[in-house]
Image (cartoon, rainbow, N blue to C red):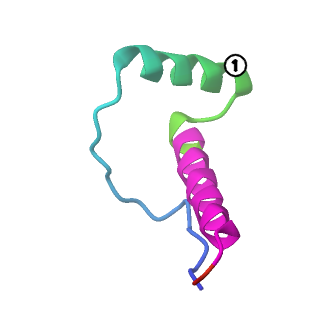
Amino acid sequence: MTQPADPKEKACICIDIPDALFHRVEEYCKSKGISTDEFIFDAISDKLLSVHREKRRKPRL
């Protein structure tokens, strides 16, 4: 079982995000009053959780 992530621990992930997408994220975060780091952390966490659930739905051999 994996441990829940701590958003206060810092690490750098260097990825190329298209400018248009990053600007959309910035605008969304400004409108909701959250930081882009928090949004990206939540998005990655949600994606990993959904991938784990997908694996669990597949029948085992």
Magenta span: predominant SS is helix
Asked if 14 appears above or below 34 in the picture, the reply is: below
Q: Secondary structure at mark 1?
A: helix
Residue 47 picture location, percent across and down? 58, 52
Q: Is 6 contained in the magenta span? A: no
Q: Which residue ends up furthest to the front in the rendered image?
A: 61
Q: Residue at x 46, y 65 (%)?
A: 9
Q: Is 34 left, or right, of 13 in this rendering?
A: right
Asked if 24 appears above or below 8 in the picture, the reply is: above
Asked if 52 appears above or below 45 in the picture, the reply is: below
* Magenta segment boundaries in residue numbering: 39-59
Residue 38 picture location, percent across and down? 58, 44
Quarter residue 17 falls in: top left
Q: Residue at x 41, y 60 (%)?
A: 10
Residue 24 picture location, percent across and down? 53, 17
Residue 13 picture location, percent across and down? 32, 50
Q: Amino acid at mark 1?
A: Ser
Look at the image and tell me in which quarter the C terminus lies.
Answer: bottom right
Q: Is 43 contained in the magenta span? A: yes
Q: Is 12 left, or right, of 32 in this rendering?
A: left
Q: Is 12 left, or right, of 39 in this rendering?
A: left
Q: Residue at x 58, y 80 (%)?
A: 3
Q: Residue at x 56, y 68 (%)?
A: 5
Look at the image and tell me in which quarter the N terminus lies.
Answer: bottom right
Which residue position is annotated with label 1?
31
**Picture mark count:** 1
Mark 1 Cα-neighbour bin, 10 Å: few <14, some 14–19, many ≥20: few
